[in-house]
Amino acid sequence: MNKIIGFIGCGNMGQAMIGGITKAKLVAPKNIIVGDLNEKSLKKAAEKYGIRTTTDNNEVAENADILVLSVKPNLYPIVIKGIKDHVKENVTIVTIAAGKNIKGTEEMFGRKLKIVRVMPNTPALVGEGMAAICPNDKVTKEETEEVLHIFESFGKGEIVNEKLMDVVTSVSGSSPAFVYMFIEAMADAAVLDGMPRNQSYKFAAQAVLGSAKMVLDTGEHPGALKDMVCSPGGTTIEGVAALEEKGFRNAVISAVRKTTQKSIELSK
């Protein structure tokens, strides 16, 4: 890719993206420019990745062919107001903020631009992110693929219809929190039965990681994989029965749907 990629915001997600891009060698470090008011974060990123940095967002906007707005949702109106007259005419704007739909972003810029709305998640920080990608009608297929490749450099990505973005927010954006709670609960049970705390977290987390990898790598239905572990009259089916008795699946479904509804409310 022979383009300049700009980032406004050098927080955790921004640095996760920069790390993925540089590791995959999608562009040379000199073709990445990052703007942020936090000079400490900029210095850290410059030293680690060899990229260009600045405290002037307009410098980023004037140079970037692909411009990633990696700031908190509440800062979007302020940031966009400051840069909207400085972005290139043919720039592709990438938004990664929950609740910021394409139409709203277009209105903040005051004109129709190429906009790709993306919902990433925090496992991007360890190279295992999941991102939903939705371009507006000005973005070409090739430009959409460029953005997809950026997010696939630190995980996986899928192109989705914007109407699914609220579901994406819950099933992958917010759900890591649910998974962490599951890991913590399993570890607590192991500690209760005598296992040291640090060891219990390792066993529980690795079990979740390996199980997820089996779903992705085998293509088998999760129910079929569950059945493989459940021997007749065995230990696992005893635990499955306890989860069913406590309404485990219904609790998870309710949590995901509640999160989706909250995302819909925030998008209005």
Image (tube, rainbow, N blue to C red):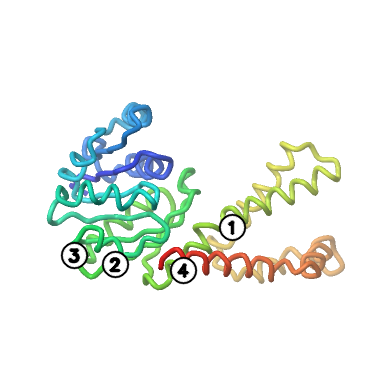
Of the image marks 3 and 1, the number of the one nearer the N terminus? 3
Measuring from the top left, give residue 245's x and y in whole percent. 81, 70
Q: Nearer the viewer, mark 1 or mark 2?
A: 2
Gap in Å between the C-alphas at discs 3 and 2? Answer: 9 Å
Q: Secondary structure at mark 1?
A: helix
Q: Are marks 4 and 2 in contact (CB under 8 Å)?
A: no
| Foreground residue among 241 and 235 | 241
| Foreground residue among 107 and 47 | 107
Would you call the spot at circle 1 few (<14 residues within 10 Å), some (14-19), or many (20 or more)?
few
Of the image marks 3 and 2, the number of the one nearer the N terminus? 2
Disc 3 residue type (three-letter): Lys
Would you call the spot at circle 2 few (<14 residues within 10 Å), some (14-19), or many (20 or more)?
few
Tag shown at residue 251:
none
> In the rendered image, which residue does mark 1 sit on?
212
Gap in Å between the C-alphas at discs 1 and 4? Answer: 28 Å
Measuring from the top left, give residue 40's x and y in whole percent. 37, 27
Tag shown at residue 264:
4
> In the rendered image, which residue does mark 3 sit on?
112
Q: Are marks 1 and 4 in contact (CB under 8 Å)?
A: no
Q: Secondary structure at mark 2?
A: helix
Disc 4 residue type (three-letter): Ile
In the image, residue 15 sits, relative to residue 149, either above or below, namely above
Of the image marks 3 and 4, the number of the one nearer the N terminus? 3
